[in-house]
Amino acid sequence: MASKRDLKKDIDYLVSEVVSDCYTYMLINGDKKRDDAIAIIQSILDTRFELIHRIKHPAKKDDRKAVKAHYREIQKDALKAIDEHFTKLSELTK
């Protein structure tokens, strides 16, 4: 298992990439679908806050296997959320 610190850094990096791409989209396209891009940014930030909260507060601290499973689930959820938000952004660019 990676450390909690590294997991938080990875989530922050991936979220910043989504936000950066959204701002780039808004810069290139102007006001066209600006509200949709802002909605993607708000959604990914809400997801980030939820994931960080889950990292800081594991369910069962005394059971090592449960804790490892908890952090693996967070990793999977983070990657899934990032992929979904990149997919939404790519649909806007069509």
Image (cartoon, rainbow, N blue to C red):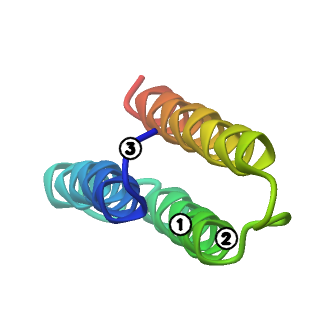
Quick check: 32 left or right of 63?
A: left
Q: Position of residue 26 (x, y in %)?
A: 26, 59
> Which label lies toward us, 2 or 3?
3
Whether residue 94 sits left or right of residue 65 in the image: it is: left
Q: Which residue lies furthest to the top in this view?
A: 94
Q: In which quarter of the image is residue 27?
A: bottom left
Of residues 15 and 25, the one drawn nearer to the viewer in this rendering: 15
10 Å neighbourhood of mark 3: few (<14), some, or many (≥20)?
A: few
SS of the residue under disc 1: helix
**Residue where numbered disc 1 is placed:** 48
Q: Mark 2 points at which residue?
A: 50
For disc 3, the marked residue is 2
Q: Quadrant of the C terminus?
A: top left
Residue beneath the point at 27% across and 60% down:
16
Q: Residues within 10 Å of mark 1 (few under 14, many from 20)?
A: many
C-alpha separation, residue under disc 2 versus residue under disc 3: 19 Å
Q: Of the two numbered discs 2 and 3 on the same chain, state the one appearing first in sequence.
A: 3
Q: Is mark 2 on a helix, strand or loop?
A: helix
Name which residue type carries label 2: Glu
Q: How many marks?
A: 3
Amino acid identity at mark 3: Ala
Q: What residue type is labelled 1?
A: Arg
- Residue at (62, 47) in percent of width and height: 71
Q: Are marks 2 and 3 in contact (CB under 8 Å)?
A: no
Quadrant in the picture for residue 46: bottom right
